């Protein structure tokens, strides 16, 4: 396989992975004060160090539910 073709495949995948990983860490920082210390450290390590599976696991299992404020309209 030609190196240029390989780079054309790998570079966009790496950019998307870094962008989603960055968003996962940003989302984690928004709810940082609502978590226990061990939970914070574990999720940050999982997002940062575990290739694509870290941020996938965070979005599936680690996100806190959104709290509804009083001035939001209800769709019920």
Image (cartoon, rainbow, N blue to C red):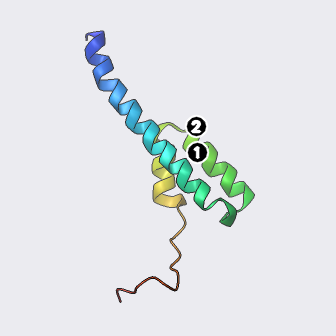
Mark 2 neighbour class, 10 Å CA radius: few under 14, some 14 to 19, many 20 or more: few
Residue 5 placement, left or right of 66: left
Which circle marks residue 20 in the picture? none
User: Residue at point 50% right, 79% down?
Assistant: 68
User: Residue at point 61% right, 51% down?
Assistant: 43
User: Residue at point 56% right, 48% down?
Assistant: 25
In the image, farthest residue toward the front:
71
Q: Is residue 69 above or below residue 54?
A: below
Q: Is residue 50 above or below residue 57?
A: above
Name the quarter where the N terminus is drawn: top left
Pointers 2 and 1 in contact (C-beta within 8 Å): yes
Q: What element does badge 1 sit on?
A: helix
In the image, farthest residue toward the right:
37
45, 14: nearer the viewer? 14
Q: Quadrant of residue 20?
A: top left
Distance of label 2 from label 1 (alpha carbons): 6 Å
Residue 47, position as x, y percentages in the image: 55, 44
Residue 50, position as x, y percentages in the image: 54, 39
Q: Is residue 31 above or below residue 5?
A: below
Residue at the disc numbered 1 = 46
Name the quarter where the C terminus is drawn: bottom left
Residue at the disc numbered 2 = 49
In the image, farthest residue toward the bottom:
76
User: Residue at point 61% right, 54% down?
Assistant: 29
38, 17: nearer the viewer? 17
Q: Quadrant of residue 31?
A: bottom right
Residue 63 placement, left or right of 35: left
């Amino acid at each position: 396989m030609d190196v240029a073709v390989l780079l054309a495949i790998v570079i966009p995948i790496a950019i998307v992975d870094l962008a989603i990983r960055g968003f996962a860490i940003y989302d984690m920082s928004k709810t940082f004060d609502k978590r226990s210390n061990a939970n914070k450290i574990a999720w940050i390590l999982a997002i940062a160090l575990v290739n694509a599976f870290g941020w996938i696991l965070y979005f599936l299992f680690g996100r806190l539910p959104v709290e509804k404020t009083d001035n939001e309209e209800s769709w019920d």
